[in-house]
Image (cartoon, coloured by chain):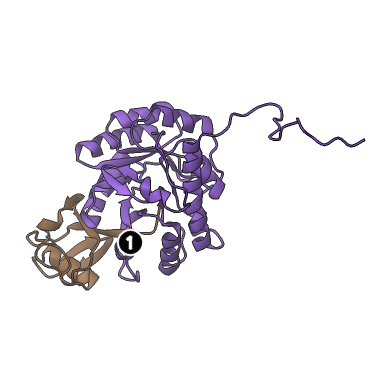
Amino acid sequence: MNITLNGTVHAVEDGASVTTLISQVTGRNLAPSGQAADGRKLGVAVARNSEVVPRSQWFVTALAEGDDVELVTAVQGG
Amino acid sequence: MAGTTVAGAAGTAQHTADPFIVDGVHLGSRLITGTGGAPSLDGLGAALIASGTELTTVAMRRYSPAETGSLFQLLVDHNIRVLPNTAGCFTARDAVMTAELAREALETDWVKLEVIADEHTLLPDAVELVDATEQLVNRGFKVFAYTNDDPVLALRLENLGATAVMPLGAPIGTGLGILNPHNIELIVSRASVPVVLDAGIGTASDAALAMELGCDAVLLATAVTRAQNPAMMGEAFKHAVIAGRLAKAAGRIPRREHALASSAMEGRAEFL
């Protein structure tokens, strides 16, 4: 199925969770808690259809066709 | 917030004996740095370390797999606390959303609230700023409000529950220094939350002046990141903030119209 990720069309498996998406995009393995499995900081957040998905909910939140997902991180600025 | 005594004859021990306390957290430096404008992460890291900062702002933007290195990890590795900002937000709605994302991503409820009116001036939009401060405080955020050098607005933000008020010295990135020192003094004299001079700093003496006016801390980015030697400028600011803080506590002499000799006139030798 297709979702919109950061403004562009992005293909994910049907029923993929937010955790699956973040793993796929960042190349990092995630624990069900939403923390990176390697113990380092992941430092990203997700908004799905303009609502923030808390880290603790990533694992149990299934994406749906057409979802609009924003994946953000800290960058230089300010 | 003035009146802290600064003890000790050695020049370096003061800033640990005189911590900057905000939201119950003790910071060993009164210099808050931004990260915008640095050409590389390595260079930025060196400048931050040289500046002695313990709190640094970052912006929140779309994740890009092409980006090499993690700014957040760099700060974590150097024990520098992160202060996410809402740079680039023009409305309270966008600022609240950005703050929520930052809280999730960086696991902090501190936020530097920046709601700007337009890209040309980058000046805070007072109406949206007040609205966003109220919403964020209600959502449990610790709001560091970037504001105009307006004593009335600063007090409003404090009354809404802002953790710190951060008046600008001059518009962001201009390096014009503190354009209205009188207003900054007025803000400081009435505030019971920390006052952080934010934006407009060009060089070390501007930061020293901010501290002499009674500010609790100084926030700057461009002055370091775009300096010809960022690490050296970072170090200059470290000393400037300490010097200004000491001078404020020491009590400057009053200004006078005419000269006042510091040597006695009596007992001079006479030459015939």
The image quadrant that residue B218 belongs to is: top left
Query: What residue does disc 1 label?
Result: B75
Along the viewing direction, whichever of B173 and A25 lies nearer the viewer: B173
* Chain to which mark 1 belongs: B
Along the viewing direction, whichever of A25 and A28 lies nearer the viewer: A28
The image quadrant that residue B177 belongs to is: top right
Along the viewing direction, whichever of A77 and A53 lies nearer the viewer: A77
Residue drawn at point x = 44 percent, y = 65 percent: B46
Quadrant where the N terminus of chain B sits is top left
Q: Which chain is brown?
A: A
Name the side, left or right, on which B185 lies relative to A58: right
Quadrant where the C terminus of chain B sits is top right
Name the side, left or right, on which A14 lies relative to B140: left
Residue B66 in picture, x, y percent from top left = 34, 71
Give amino acid for label 1. Leu
* Chain B shade in the render: purple
The image quadrant that residue A26 belongs to is: bottom left
